[in-house]
Amino acid sequence: YLPIISTSKQWYQRRVRDSRHLLTRKCCCLSVKLGRQIMTRSGRVRILSAVCPHQPSTLFQQAYQRDAIFQRGFCTTSIEELVMQHTHLVNSKPTLMGKKLDAGGVFTNSELRLSDVEVIGFDYDYTLAPYTKLLDKTIFDMIIEGLVSSRHYPSALSDLNYDPGFLARGIHYDINNGIFMKIDAYNRIQSETVHHCFRPLSISEISELYPGRRIHLDRQGSKASQRRYRQIVDIFEIPQLYAWCAVLNYLESCSSRAVHPSIVFEDIKNVTADLHLRGELHSEISANIGLYLKKNPKLVGMLAMLREQNKQLFILTNSPYNFIDVGMRHMMGPDWKDYFDVIICLSRKPKFFEDRQRVFRRISSNNVATFGEVTKFKKGEIYCEGNVKEFHALTGWDSDKILYFGDQMYADLAEPILNMGWHTGAIIRELAEEMELLNSYQYQDLMFKLTELDYLINGMQSFLPDPDAVLLTEKWCTERKQVRNKLRDLHSCSFGSIFRTHVTPTLFYRRLSRFAEIYTSDVTNLASYNASHYRFTPARTNLPHELTTRSLLDYDTFFVK
């Protein structure tokens, strides 16, 4: 850190004018002792928009704040000084952050006090149950086998291999054209991510298919089955859609006849539905539970901690009881049911939150749904179906006292937070890999260069239409594009980060911030927080039209005894 020993407004202006590049490369920490007061402040000199809660205020990853003082001082900069700063940027290397970001943290979109929460609920698949990557390959292989055996697709499809790094949650796809793309929070297409199967599309091809390079999601049918554009929102969908991509690519390259993407999509969707209806997928997982389900040693301790702090716990899942029983025994032992006050299976979310007619049924010891009326939930018993209205009536739990964790934003979280008044938490498994990347030197180096290039390009606008300024702006924009692409390629997914495009958040993150008050990579991360007293509070961020706190202060009069 660079110590600053002056507090006057003129010093900042002179510092910007004389050696701007030094200030942009260091986080300036000011500790000034005046009489009995000690003031510690942080200098920020750059704006980088759309920061997620898991990208905190660090030198390379926070939204750098340029206050009004720097804006006034910036006007004295010349083209030559900007060129000098660019030369220094090319030849310099930033200092690695001393503090790593916490990959096991719980991140906050909206304020949530755990002391107000009396009941905590969990989904099962990918919430309590963290599956291995092998499961995706198994699902892909089972889909291909079903296409060949029951839909009479070419037997050569059996030679196709699964690539776990091509698709990810949050990616949109166009059923009519077989196209995958990443969409930002304003429905704009990120051009570098548009693929027809595995082939990237050119700008001209994208503009021809999607005028204005936007998609109009609000103009689609009200039902998901009627929509042309859909989003990968469930991890289980990834191998299914990769199968669509791989099969469509094979048929188009080997067949002389035209192949309509939507026909192949429907066939794969039906084959996948058959795997679930016939129970083949659940049987395969249950028979090889050690291969597909990770053991988390923290799970038992977390649930025990919550019970010690007088939290009531429940499971609400769409999976059948015999399937989750195998998984929970594998992770927690035979007495796993003792940790939960209510266990509900086959809930058919989101219909559980929408339908008011379906009643609860008790599942007998031989795994058969009984016909008697359920008038009270009993601990240790298993229930299925039902609806949220009856759920509240039987438990007596208040909506605003419930915190529910799930991994599927629409089925698990949207209805509870928007219409039920529940608190919600999202389990985003991809976050662990994202945090590891944010901690890498390569990412921080590229992020620093991107931030500085943005500053230089914005500064050069003051000198347009000077010919030198035009040429330099074009050159630096090309460099910025290269840095952005390198940042995207650091991610294992071919489409880059699921949380952001180059500048703005993705539509996936926009939905995440709307439907989840908190989010984390693993549900057991909650064990690091006191469930009786902890308050999750989001950091206050300045809107584009707002001045920073530092801009509102008069530095000549603020530091007084």
Image (cartoon, rainbow, N blue to C red):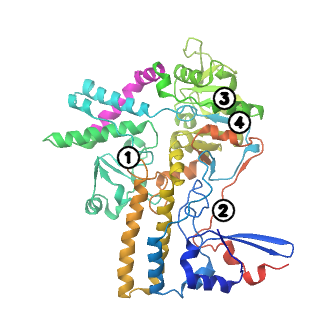
Which mark lies nearer to you, 1 or 2? 2
Question: Crowding near pointer 1: few (<14 within 10 Å), some, many (20+)?
Answer: some
Q: Which residue is mark 1?
A: 227
Which residues lie in the magenta part?
264-286
Give the amino acid type for the residue marked by disc 1 in the picture.
Answer: Arg
Q: Residue 298 occupies which quadrant of the picture?
A: top right
Q: Which residue is mark 3?
A: 300
Q: Which mark is residue 540?
A: 2
SS class, disc 2: loop
Which mark lies nearer to you, 2 or 3? 3
Q: Earlier in the sequence, mark 2 or mark 3?
A: 3
Quadrant the N terminus occupies: bottom right
Q: CA distance from mark 3 to mark 4?
A: 17 Å
Give the amino acid type for the residue marked by disc 3 in the picture.
Answer: Val
Give the amino acid type for the residue marked by disc 4 in the picture.
Answer: Val
266 part of magenta stretch: yes
Q: CA distance from mark 4 to mark 1?
A: 36 Å
Left or right, residue 550 beside residue 490: right
Which residue is located at x 47 percent, y 75 percent? 88
Question: Crowding near pointer 4: few (<14 within 10 Å), some, many (20+)?
Answer: many
